[in-house]
């Protein structure tokens, strides 16, 4: 009889362990499926943001958040989305959550740092951008360096800004935002030939913006090349007639 009881108890223990094992597998499977689903919705959300379909992007990112509330990438993407939607309170909320979840993520550091600088919180912004620019896991440090340069421009530290932009270009000499910023700063410093050279480098990898055309026009006027300045003026009015730069154009260019 004792042997039978031992057998029954052993069987019960085996069944209990089996049930627990199945429960663990089921939980892991559910978590895995949630993670996979969150990743799909995250990718869709980012893609729709790129297409400027912001409401559809929001739907997908909120679904990703529901599936993976502790995913810093999802929080980071949502923060950027709310920036695009001009909801700065929500953007700040999600950036702070992303930083809490993944304080060493260079992408989160870079985006949050840029956001804080854009909103006048320069000290917090520069702190995060410095971390992102020196993060050993960051294989695109030039992005954070360029954002740091822009932050320095905002506080009127042009020389420091130039140092950041030049450092960014040492790492990636074809990065359009850094080239564009150097064109602008060179013109403003009265360095017209370097400004012209930076514009040519920029145009070898990217298309004109209202800013590049405006500073291109001003640079050529300063160099006495009125014909080329008029060409830039025409391009600016034709391609970006509603831009602030186009509105500043004088009707009678020499």
Image (cartoon, grey):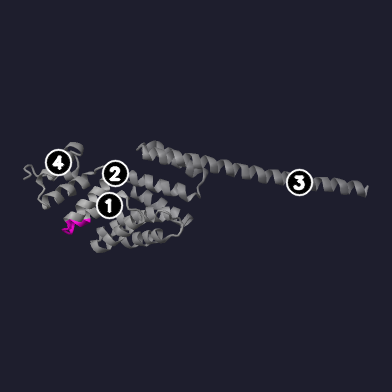
* Viewer-nearest of discs 4 and 3: 4
- Residue 206 - label: 2
Left or right of 253, for residue 111: right
Residue 187 lies in magenta, yes or no?
A: yes
Residue with the mark numbered 1:
179
Which badge, 1 or 3, is on the more N-terminal residue?
3
Is 134 in the magenta? no
Counting residues from the N terminus, which is met first, the one under dot 3 or under dot 2? 3
Q: CA distance from mark 4 to mark 1?
A: 21 Å
Question: Is disc 1 placed on a helix, strand or loop?
Answer: helix
Q: Nearer the viewer, residue 99 or 107?
A: 107
16 to the left or right of 157 = right
Q: What segment is highlighted magenta in the picture?
A: 185-191
- Binning the other alpha carbons within 10 Å of mark 4 as few (below 14), some (14 to 19) or many (20 upward) gives few
Residue 92 position, x and y percent, is 37, 52
Q: Quadrant of the C terminus?
A: top left
Q: Quadrant of residue 144?
A: bottom left
Q: Earlier in the sequence, mark 2 or mark 1?
A: 1
- Residue placed under numbered mark 4 in the picture: 231
Mark 2–mark 1 distance (CA, rounded to whole Å): 10 Å
User: Front-most of 105 and 55?
Assistant: 105
Residue position marked by numbered label 3 in the rendering: 16
């Amino acid at each position: 009889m004792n042997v039978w009881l031992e057998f029954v108890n052993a069987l019960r223990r085996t069944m209990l362990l089996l049930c627990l094992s199945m429960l663990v597998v089921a939980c892991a499977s559910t978590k895995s499926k949630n993670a996979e689903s969150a990743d799909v919705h995250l990718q869709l959300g980012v893609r729709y943001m790129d297409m400027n379909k912001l409401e559809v992007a929001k739907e997908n990112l909120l679904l990703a958040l529901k599936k993976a509330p502790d995913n810093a990438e999802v929080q980071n993407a949502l923060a950027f989305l709310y920036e695009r939607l001009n909801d700065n309170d929500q953007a700040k909320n999600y950036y702070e959550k992303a930083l809490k979840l993944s304080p060493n993520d260079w992408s989160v550091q870079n985006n949050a740092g840029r956001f804080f600088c854009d909103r006048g919180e320069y000290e917090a912004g520069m702190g995060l951008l410095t971390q992102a620019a020196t993060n050993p896991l960051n294989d695109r440090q030039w992005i954070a360096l360029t954002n740091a340069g822009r932050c320095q421009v905002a506080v009127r530290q042009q020389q420091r800004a130039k140092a950041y932009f030049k450092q960014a270009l040492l790492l990636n000499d074809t990065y359009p935002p850094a080239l564009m910023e150097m064109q602008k700063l060179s013109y403003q410093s009265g360095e017209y030939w370097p400004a012209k050279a930076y514009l040519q480098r920029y145009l070898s990898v990217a298309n004109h913006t209202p800013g590049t055309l405006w500073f291109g026009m001003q640079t050529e006027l300063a160099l006495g090349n009125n014909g080329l300045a008029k060409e830039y003026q025409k391009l600016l009015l034709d391609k970006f007639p509603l831009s602030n730069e186009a509105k500043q154009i004088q009707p009678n260019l020499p």
